[in-house]
Image (tube, rainbow, N blue to C red):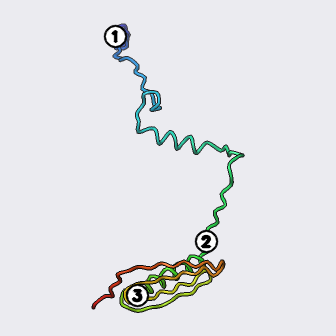
């Protein structure tokens, strides 16, 4: 039994191996890894529930699906009209907000845009128009 106790004490008295504790900061402002910055900023923004009382509220209103479809169709029609002018054809398009007339006067392309709501007229002339020769 004495042998067992002595062997037990010897086994417990094995020298411990340790190294220095090394502090490594996490925050990149204090010498930490710069790749932690976006993670720390994201955590801070997720926890921030402060709303600035003097900030103006956003007045942006998302356009309805019908408005987006109408805008897309108008854009497509205008694109087709301009493509037809390249082939030597003339034309016009009228929508709720504007009227566009495209005229080819012997190589001078005249685009007349009229704002129907205000009556304002804008005229654009491009010289040197050569129709496609297909």
Circles 3 and 1 in contact, beta carbons < 8 Å: no
Which residue position holds label 1?
A: 10
Sequence-wise first label, 3 or 1: 1
Q: Position of residue 69 (x, y in %)?
A: 55, 79
Which residue position holds label 3?
A: 85
Distance CA(mark 2)–CA(mark 3) = 31 Å
Q: Residues within 10 Å of mark 2 (few under 14, many from 20)?
A: few
Distance CA(mark 1)–CA(mark 2) = 82 Å
Q: Is residue 71 left or right of residue 51?
A: left
Q: Position of residue 41 (x, y in %)?
A: 52, 41
Q: Quadrant of the N terminus?
A: top left
Q: Quadrant of the C terminus?
A: bottom left
Which is more toward the observer, 102 or 84? 102
Which is more toward the observer, 37 or 26? 37
Q: Is residue 97 placed above or below 10 in the rendered structure?
A: below
The residue at the point 49 percent across, 79 percent down is 75
Query: Total marks drawn?
Result: 3
Element class at badge 1: helix
Q: Position of residue 106 (x, y in %)?
A: 38, 90
Which is more toward the observer, 72 or 15? 72
Which residue position holds label 2?
A: 63
């Amino acid at each position: 039994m004495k042998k067992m106790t002595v062997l037990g004490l010897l086994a417990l008295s094995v020298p411990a191996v340790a190294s220095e504790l090394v502090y490594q900061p996490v925050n990149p402002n204090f010498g930490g890894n710069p790749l932690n910055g976006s993670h720390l900023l994201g955590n801070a923004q997720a926890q921030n529930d402060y709303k600035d009382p003097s900030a103006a509220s956003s007045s942006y209103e998302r356009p309805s699906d019908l408005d987006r479809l109408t805008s897309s169709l108008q854009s497509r029609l205008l694109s087709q009209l301009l493509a037809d002018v390249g082939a030597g054809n003339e034309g016009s398009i009228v929508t709720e907000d504007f009227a566009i007339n495209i005229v080819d006067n012997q190589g001078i392309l005249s685009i007349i845009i009229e704002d129907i709501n205000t009556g304002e007229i804008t005229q654009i002339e491009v010289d040197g128009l050569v129709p496609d020769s297909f």
